[in-house]
Image (tube, grey):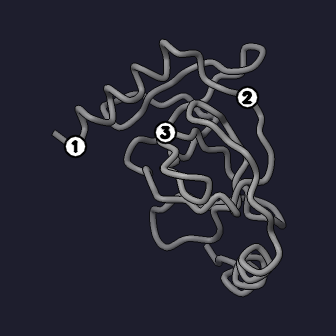
Amino acid sequence: MSKDFTGWHEQKSNIHENKIRLHFHERDVWFTSVGANIGFEQDGKGEEFLRPIVILKKFNNETLWGITLTSKTKTGEYYFSFKHDIDRVSTANLSQLRLIDSKRLKYQIGSMCEDDFAELKKRVVDLVN
């Protein structure tokens, strides 16, 4: 499968030079410009290379840890499914945890409930232990 690395490079340059940082919180679910990535790393889709993420940890107004999401239901130790918004189910791919600059955030689409977020954090900690 061919990937549009050139298109992503143009988009990434524009984000770096022109994008303002948006206000965000832990537990938020955002569409984020994650780009065209290598191998099994999850790619963004469309012209803006967007993919939903959940914000696991806010370090400051510039950086965060995010986990990419999929609408496909997946099970196993590397996945955590939860509902947000009006019955929208997403699955967090725990192995895709990454540092993200807040300039990549495009728009918020929801947030996790506190109980699901606590379980997500527990699952991430268990994964690295």
Mark 2 lies on a secondary structure that is strand
Q: Which residue is mark 2?
A: 110
Separation of residues labelled 2 and 1 (CA atoms): 27 Å
Question: Where is residue 57 shown, x and y percent of the image?
Answer: 47, 42
Name the residue rendered at 65%, 58% in the picture: 102
| Amino acid type at mark 3 | Leu
Question: Where is residue 12 shown, x and y percent of the image?
Answer: 71, 77
Name the residue rendered at 51%, 24% in the picture: 81
Which residue is at the far front? 60
| Amino acid type at mark 1 | Val
Q: Earlier in the sequence, mark 2 or mark 1?
A: 2
Q: Which residue is mark 3?
A: 56
| Amino acid type at mark 2 | Gly
Q: Residues within 10 Å of mark 3 (few under 14, many from 20)?
A: many
Numbered label attached to residue 128: 1
**50 vs 71: above or below:** below
Question: Where is residue 6 shown, x and y percent of the image?
Answer: 72, 87
Separation of residues labelled 3 and 1 (CA atoms): 15 Å
Mark 1 lies on a secondary structure that is helix
Quadrant housing the C terminus: top left
Q: Earlier in the sequence, mark 3 or mark 1?
A: 3
Front in this rendered view, residue 27 or 23:
23
Q: Is residue 92 left or right of residue 83?
A: left
